[in-house]
Amino acid sequence: MPIRFADADWPSASRYWLTNARIPACLLGDTGASLARPDAEGVIDADLLIAEGRIARIERPGASNSDAIPQLDLGGRQVWPTLIDIHTHLDKGHTVGRSPNVDGTFHNARLAAAADRPYWTIADLRRRMDFGLRCALAHGVSAIRTHIDTYPETIETSWQALREMRDEWRGKIDLQAVSLCPVDLLASEFGDRVAAAVAQSHGLLGGVTRASIANHGAPLDNIDALLDRLFALASRHDLDVDLHVDETHDPDAATLPHIARAAMRRGYRGRVVCGHCCSLAMQPDAIIDRTLDMLAEADIAIVTLPAVNLYLQDRNDGRTPRWRGVTVVKEMLKRGIRVAAAGDNCRDSFYAYGDHDAVDTFRQAVRILHLDHPLTGAPALVGSTPAAIGKLTGHGRLALGQSARLIVFNARSINEIVSRPHSDRVILADGERLRATVPDYSELWEQA
């Protein structure tokens, strides 16, 4: 008999079957080709053998019938790999009470974030980052890439805190880090300091393609020279690149073509990620097409941040927003450009809400970007695609031999996953049920 989800007695044996599971084909490795054809949502029925904490077999339903080992009949419930948040800001997280954004605009988000940085001691950073990581773990996230504000007054403290947290969380959440400051700051000797700190921490070199004293807008007059400097620093230390790009509704903000040309010029094809890219959606179709051609040629990956950009973009006092703030994701996917969705900020001046929940990111991305009808490829945006972008082996898809880090939903279809928040989802870590719970906000209040 299928389980009653709330009362399930999850196997404790070293070998057991999860039978009558349903898995999105876009989250399966090569094994998916030997299974039954997917349904209209791109979902495949399967049985999974878990052995010594790893996925030992993925078979058509019924394969376990002759095995005398424990079985748990999932009754057609969805099984996904644990998910990836490929663009976050753990260092800013959970500062909304201390340094709020007074009106929700990008301009005042930036000012509030700057005003909060003097509080960023190692103890403060560790406390807030640990809270965010525990939230993510309980929700079923197993890998995170976080951008780290990297300024002269924060570089040592923030990167030390990052290294400490990455070491402490190894084996639970794999943590990547990217430096973040306006690209004009990298033109000076400080750029050498940043690149050296990133290399020491095995991170990625990043930046935001606007001036240090301005919001996103028309490209800086010396943007090509600044990008050449950034790529020279990255090349010197053999660092991949991850940039914040054109986060505005202003169609004149068009640094993406400059980045694509610089990546090709500097031999960085396939090693660059660009986040946000909002203004591209506000440009004429002919310009969009030319830009997408360049992105495809340079093999630049894109990360869309739908919840945060819905919050920030087109915000004016007393006026209802007229657009959704996201980039041209469907057009990118048609070109074969790799696109992931991520959570971005969490309860800080750039986004007042959130809980480090990649399932919530997925649900919001589907709704905001109309990534439905059909839903077949949508789960890849928080699973297999960010795994490929981040070179995160063993994450984001179900494949033979990898660790059994799984999410079991009390849902039989992707539609049901989009429809409810699924706070009752079950997380498996190395094949065992994870008992982690989302931490209470009182911890933050008491330690502040």
Image (cartoon, helix red, strand yellow):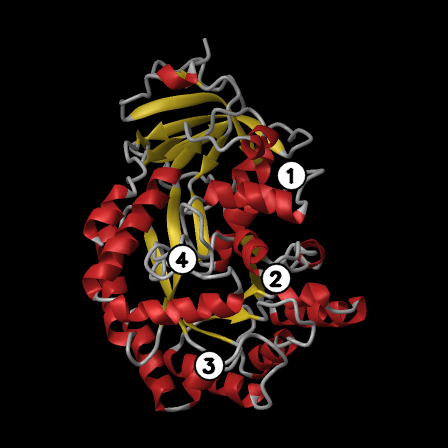
Which residue corresponds to mark 4? Answer: 348
Residue 51 visible in the displayed image: yes
Looking at the picture, which amino acid does disc 2 mark?
Asn
Q: Amino acid at mark 4?
A: Asp
- Please tell me whether residue 209 is drawn above or below residue 392 in the rendered image: below
Instruction: Look at label 3 and name its amino acid.
Output: Ser
Disc 2/disc 3 C-alpha distance (Å): 23 Å
Q: Position of residue 229 (x, y in %)?
A: 47, 87
Q: Which comes sooner in the sequence, label 2 or label 4?
A: 2
Give me the disc on residue 316.
Answer: 2
Q: Are marks 3 and 4 in contact (CB under 8 Å)?
A: no
Is 127 situated above or below 4?
A: below
Give SS at disc 4: loop
User: Label 2's element?
Assistant: loop
Answer few, some or many: residues within 10 Å of disc 1's Cα (few below 14, many 20 plus, some between 14 and 19): some
Viewer-nearest of labels 2 and 4?
2
Instruction: Quadrant for residue 279, please give it.
Output: bottom right
- Residue wearing tag 1: 376
**Is residue 35 positioned above or below 354 on the image?**
above
Secondary structure at badge 1 equals loop
Which residue in the protein does label 3 denote? Answer: 212
Type of amino acid under label 1: Thr
Q: What residue lies at 32% left-to-right and 49% top-to-bottom? A: 133
Residue 250 lies, in percent from the top left, at 66, 71
x, y percent for residue 10: 33, 21
For marks 2 and 3, the one nearer the N-term is 3
Point out the frontmost of discs 1 and 2. 2
Q: Judge left or right: residue 329 versus residue 416.
A: right
Query: What is the CA distance from the residue labelled 3 to the residue labelled 1?
Result: 41 Å
Q: Within 10 Å of the Cα at label 3, are there few (<14), some (14-19), or many (20+) other Cα atoms?
A: few
Residue situated in front as seen by the camera: 413 or 254: 254
